[in-house]
Amino acid sequence: SVIHEFATLCLTTLSVDFIGKAQIFENNGLPPLIVLLSSSDPDVKKNSLQVIFNLVQDYKSCQAVHK
């Protein structure tokens, strides 16, 4: 949906810096992003994957993914 597309696009921007990453993790943002990877909208998939990619670029964030 358009809402998911713009929401994931916003999260892509927020997931670039550490504070944004921390906020996404603190608000349990990762599980919904993983669900959105199966979206039929290719833009939602791409944006969700980009957010996840950004999250795991930071080692401490990466540890949170493995918890």
Image (spheres, helix red, strand yellow):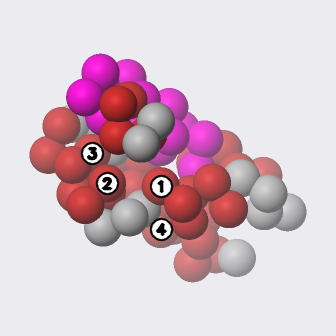
Tags 1 and 2 in contact by the CB under 8 Å rule? Answer: yes
User: Residues under labels 4 and 2: Cα distance?
Assistant: 16 Å
Location of residue 14 in the rendering, given as x and y in whole percent from the top left corner: 29, 50
In front of the other: 51 or 6 = 51
Q: Residue at x 25, y 61 (%)?
A: 26
Range drawn in magenta: 48-61
Q: Which of the 4 image quadrants contains residue 1?
A: bottom right
**Mark 1 or mark 4: which is in front?**
1
Q: Amino acid at mark 3?
A: Lys
Q: Is residue 52 magenta-colored?
A: yes
User: Residues under labels 3 and 4: Cα distance?
Assistant: 15 Å
Q: N-terminal of the two: label 3 or label 1? A: 3
Q: Is residue 46 magenta-colored?
A: no
Within 10 Å of disc 3 (Cα), the crowding (few <14, some 14-19, many 20+) is many
- Which residue has dot 2 on it? 25
Placement of 16 over or under 45, stated as above or below: above
